[in-house]
Amino acid sequence: MKCDQLSIFLENRAGRLAEVTRLLSEAKVNIRALSLADTSDFGILRLIVSDFDKAQKTLKDAGFTVGKTTVVAVVVDDHPGGLHALLEMLRNASINVEYMYAFVQQTGNNAVIIFRFDRTDQAIELLAENNIQTIPSEELSKL
């Protein structure tokens, strides 16, 4: 299952990230997962949120450059080697992980990791064939 991720361009200056979190807080949008990658001049903030459309509109209306990216939320066994087994399976199928980051989940049995693949549809098929659970956007925002 595919998930919608907000990708927000941020100038690398003090307080810019706080502007995003303030706007989302005021809009009653919960941040479920995030990743921030930066250079000396700018950063890309990637978010999984409780209400994608509301968050996107709120941030665009405030002048932020906001994009929509397709990612996959994968349930990974939370034990030594759990992530490695998944990555080996993807490597053997020549599916590249462009980036990934963790999702905070309430239970301790599994981890949820957000993946951006170079071949998303093929990755989803491979995961399904191997009985690896993915989580759709509407469920992910409720965890």
Image (spheres, rainbow, N blue to C red):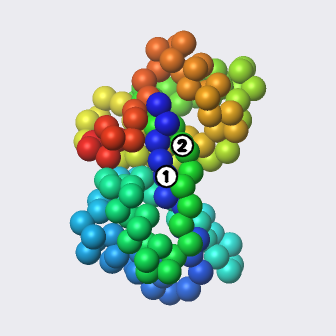
Rendered location of residue 119, percent (x, y): 68, 33
Extreme residue in the bottom direction: 14
Q: Residue at x 42, y 24 (%)?
A: 133
Rendered location of residue 17, percent (x, y): 46, 76
Mark 2 or 1, nearer chain start: 1
Q: Residue at x 31, y 38 (%)?
A: 139
Q: Horizontally, is 92 left or right of 3 in the view?
A: right
- Circle 2: is it few (<14), some (14-19), or many (20+) Cα within 10 Å? many
The reply to whether the C-beta atoms of the residues labelled 2 and 1 are less than 8 Å apart is: yes
Q: What residue sits right under mark 1 in the picture?
A: 5
- Circle 1: is it few (<14), some (14-19), or many (20+) Cα within 10 Å? many
Q: Give me the disc on residue 63.
A: none
Residue type of the residue flagged with mark 2: Val
Q: Quadrant of residue 9?
A: bottom right
Q: Nearer the viewer, residue 113 or 21?
A: 21
Please tell me whether mark 2 sits on a helix, a strand or a loop: strand
Q: Residue at x 33, y 70 (%)?
A: 24
19 is higher (above) or lower (below) than 82: below
Q: What residue sits right under mark 2 in the picture?
A: 71
Determine if residue 105 is in view: no
83 is higher (above) or lower (below) than 33: above
Q: Horizontally, is 38 left or right of 61 in the view?
A: right
Residue type of the residue flagged with mark 1: Gln
Determine if residue 71 is in view: yes
Please tell me whether mark 1 sits on a helix, a strand or a loop: strand
Q: Quadrant of the C terminus?
A: top left
Rendered location of residue 51, percent (x, y): 33, 55
Q: Residue at x 58, y 20 (%)?
A: 125
Rendered location of residue 131, percent (x, y): 47, 14
Distance in Å between CA atoms under marks 2 and 1: 7 Å
